Structures are given as structure tokens and as C-alpha cells.
Image (cartoon, rainbow, N blue to C red):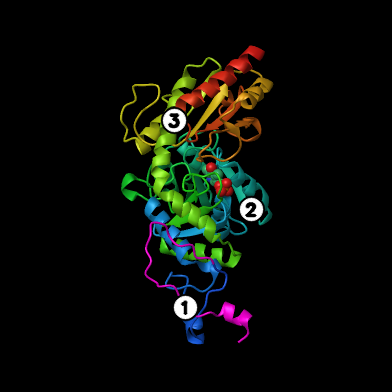
């Protein structure tokens, strides 16, 4: 054999028995078979073997199993982003002539997908008011094949009565899919039938808490139902969605610290929310644990065991790291932009649940069809807490607010 061939086919094997805290990173497109017989018989669908990189590696199987554990599911698929995971569910279960229902405050790109490709493929959509289960009931038609749920709503953070919404879907026997990115498997268990939940499918943007670094894009789809898992896997295989081994490694490395990060950012977020409640510049502080924030009672029931709230910011339960602020209508749009520009620790950027606090200004008028009119009055920003010290974040908000108001 020539040296080049020898280099590639060198027989040395390291000893197999190696154990350490982190999972090995297996990367492959090609996977070797020992024989033609094995090539013909090996299965990836039930995870009993490996056939091709797209169909799983030891590293991806391990992450899938851990995510099942996190969310209380039985089956899991990985996708290259949270948005791809949302798209995968739509593509696996909807066909031409079907209708899908989305909450009016759904994650924006999911709406864009419904208004773009889904419509192009003959799949219609309608928006329902997630704060009104009767509106969902009225929106379901014989063509409705899938109902999306989100807890709380994107950007405006209204907390719906998830149990009630699921009851409506069950009565009509419609498939349900929850965007569980906010709860992350830590705030509540989406498949917990005893708690009155039991969604059919959960989608998780692993980009957020499971990664936690602001440096990885990934998504997952989980379910407890074998039939749905099979449909999802076959669609996933046909569409060719894969994830990179090194990215999976990063998520696996971050998972053990996820609950700690969640709790820390949650605590910071409530401290910042408390401070914001005392600032005259803000007409509304939207955060599920803030007494008076839309759906606060629903949040308490689902995430905090319904303990009575006496203080302005309820202390129990889990409430993630997002907080939205509506400015007084007397504060102009240019001043709200100036406030965002003046922030130093809060960076102007999309996404959340990373180490650095983020801010995004939103114009809700183009985003919502059924929002209460007062929500659309005044500038609107969403804050995402990082892992900085809460007092430093409050000092940053204070200086930005002072600058903005002095210029008004
Ligand atoms: C970020 C996010 C997504 C999409 O995740 P990407 O990985 O950024 O595509 C979906 N849903 C919610 C609620 C999100 O916050």
C-alpha cells in the first residue's frame, strides 16, 4: 500500500473504555458498515443503529434523550434552529386545504412562515386571541388540523390559560403544538396530563436556555406519541435537516448549568421588573410574575402553584428572563430609540437567554391584529436578562432613562 492509503486505513484503535464528564463528539456523514448484510439491515428509525450522519450519531442521540428527560417526552428530533423546528411541525402535519391556527401574539417568524410558504402550499391560517379560549373554540373549523400554542406570547408576554386552551383543542380533537422555549421544561411540564396539560408536540428553541451562550442555533421537536414521532421522523428524514456535532456538543455542555442560569436570570428579571414598576416613564410593565400583567393569574396557576400574590412582583414559581416595557405615550418614538441607544450593558440584539442582557424596540402596530388598543399606545421595548449583576443592570437602565428624559 502507498503511504497515503496507509495513512487513511491505519489499523490503530485507541482503547475503548474511556469515561469523562463530557460526551464525545461524533461527527459523520459516512458511517461504516461491517458487511453488506449489516448495511441492508441496520436501522436508524428506532435508534438501534447508525446509517448516515443525517439520521443520527451517538452525540445527537444523547442530546435527544436528555431533551426528552427535560420536557417529559418520549421522542425528540433535532433541527438547525428553533424556527426550523416550528417549520418541521407544520410541514409534517399540514397539507393543501388544511388550516392552522396561531395565537395573535405568536413568535413573529412563525406568522411569517404561515403568511409565506404555508399559504403558497395551499395551507390557510387564522389568528385567535390566546387570552380568550372561547375565541379559539370559535376559530376551529373542520379544516383546522393544527393549533399552535405559546406560553407566554412573544414580545408582549401575555400569559394564556394553557389548560383551558388545551381543553378546547381536545374537545375538537385537533392536534396541538406548543412553543415551549420560555418554559424550557423548567417552568412546567408540557406533557403532564395530571396537571391538565398534555400537548401533542412541544417545540423548543435550544438557541435560548439549553445553549445559553448566544452562539448556537438549534431547535427540537418532542412528543410522547409514537404515531406523531414516526410522521415527524419520516418528514425530517425526507427534508434532510441535520445538526452539526460541534453544536450538539455545545448544547450538551450547557445543559447541566441550564437550571442555574434559568433561576438566576429569572431572579434578575424580577428585580428589574420591580424597579421598572416604580418608574413614571413606563405605562406598563409586562412580565408574567408582575401582579396585574396580562394573564398573571394563569401564570400563577401553571407555574407557581396558585399561591396568593400580595406583592407587586410575585416571588414563587418560574418566570424566565424576559420583560417588556410600554412607555408613557407622552414619550416619543425618537426618545424610546434614544433610550435603547443609551443603554451600555443591554446590547441591541435579537434572541435571549444568553450571558449578555439584550434590548429590542418593537412597533407593535404592524405585529398584532387583536391587541387591546391601549397596548399599542406608546413606545415598546423588550428586555432580556443576561447573567450580569441585577444592580448593574438597573444602574444602566437608570442612566439611559435619565439621559432620554432630560433630552425630551
Ligand atoms: C428564538 C425563538 C424561536 C426560534 O429560535 P431560533 O433558533 O432563533 O430560530 C422560536 N420561538 C421562540 C419563542 C423563540 O424565542
Residue 104 x %, y %: 56, 38
Q: Residue 268: which disc?
A: 3
Question: Could you tell me which residue is drawn at 56 percent across and 50 percent down?
Answer: 217
Element under label 3?
A: helix
Q: Nearer the viewer, mark 3 or mark 1?
A: 3
**Res. 161 image quadrant:** top left
Q: Quadrant of the C terminus?
A: top right
24 up-or-down from 326: above or below: below
**Res. 127 image quadrant:** top right
Instruction: Give the alpha-carbon distance from disc 3 to disc 1, as whole Å.
Output: 50 Å
Q: Is mark 1 within 8 Å of ligand 1?
A: no
Q: Depth check: 77 or 138 in front?
A: 77
Residue with the mark numbered 2: 118
Q: Quadrant of ligand 1?
A: top right
Element under label 2?
A: helix
Q: Residue 251: which disc?
A: none
Magenta segment = 1-27
Question: Could you tell me which residue is drawn at 47 percent across and 81 percent down?
Answer: 41
Amino acid at each position: 500500500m502507498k503511504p497515503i492509503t496507509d495513512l487513511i486505513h491505519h489499523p490503530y484503535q485507541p482503547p475503548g473504555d474511556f469515561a469523562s464528564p463530557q460526551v464525545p463528539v461524533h461527527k459523520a456523514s459516512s458511517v461504516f458498515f461491517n458487511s453488506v448484510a449489516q448495511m441492508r439491515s441496520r436501522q436508524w428509525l428506532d435508534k438501534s443503529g447508525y446509517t448516515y450522519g443525517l439520521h443520527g450519531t451517538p452525540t445527537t442521540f444523547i442530546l435527544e434523550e436528555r431533551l426528552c428527560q427535560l420536557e417529559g417526552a418520549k421522542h425528540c428530533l433535532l433541527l438547525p434552529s428553533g424556527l426550523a423546528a416550528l417549520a418541521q411541525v407544520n410541514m409534517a402535519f399540514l397539507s393543501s386545504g388544511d388550516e392552522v391556527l396561531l395565537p395573535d401574539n405568536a413568535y413573529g417568524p412563525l406568522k411569517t412562515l404561515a403568511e409565506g410558504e404555508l399559504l403558497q402550499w395551499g395551507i390557510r391560517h387564522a389568528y385567535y386571541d390566546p387570552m380568550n379560549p372561547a375565541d379559539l373554540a370559535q376559530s376551529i373549523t373542520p379544516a383546522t388540523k393544527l393549533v399552535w400554542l405559546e406560553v407566554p406570547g412573544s414580545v408582549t408576554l401575555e400569559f394564556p390559560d394553557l389548560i383551558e386552551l388545551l381543553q378546547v383543542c381536545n374537545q375538537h380533537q385537533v392536534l396541538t403544538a406548543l412553543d415551549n422555549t420560555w418554559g424550557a421544561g423548567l417552568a412546567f411540564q408540557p406533557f403532564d396530563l395530571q396537571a391538565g396539560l398534555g400537548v401533542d408536540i412541544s417545540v423548543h428553541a435550544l438557541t435560548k436556555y439549553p445553549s445559553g451562550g448566544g452562539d448556537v442555533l438549534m431547535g427540537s421537536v418532542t412528543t410522547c406519541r409514537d404515531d406523531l414521532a414516526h410522521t415527524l421522523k419520516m418528514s425530517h428524514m425526507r427534508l434532510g435537516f441535520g445538526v452539526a456535532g460541534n453544536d450538539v456538543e455545545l448544547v450538551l455542555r450547557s445543559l447541566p448549568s441550564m437550571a442555574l442560569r434559568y433561576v438566576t436570570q429569572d431572579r434578575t428579571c424580577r428585580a428589574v421588573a420591580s424597579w421598572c414598576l416604580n418608574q413614571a416613564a413606563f405605562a406598563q410593565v409586562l412580565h408574567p410574575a408582575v401582579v396585574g400583567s396580562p394573564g398573571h393569574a394563569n401564570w400563577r396557576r401553571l407555574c407557581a402553584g396558585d399561591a396568593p400574590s400580595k406583592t407587586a412582583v410575585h416571588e414563587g414559581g418560574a418566570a424566565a428572563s424576559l420583560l417588556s416595557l410600554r412607555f408613557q405615550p407622552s414619550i416619543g418614538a425618537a426618545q424610546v430609540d434614544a433610550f435603547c441607544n443609551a443603554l451600555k450593558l443591554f446590547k441591541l440584539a435579537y434572541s435571549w437567554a444568553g450571558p449578555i442582557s439584550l434590548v429590542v424596540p418593537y412597533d407593535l402596530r404592524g405585529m398584532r391584529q387583536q391587541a387591546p388598543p391601549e397596548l399599542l399606545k406608546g413606545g415598546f421595548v423588550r428586555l432580556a436578562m443576561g447573567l450580569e449583576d441585577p444592580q448593574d443592570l438597573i444602574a444602566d437602565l437608570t442612566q439611559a432613562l435619565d439621559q432620554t428624559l432630560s433630552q425630551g
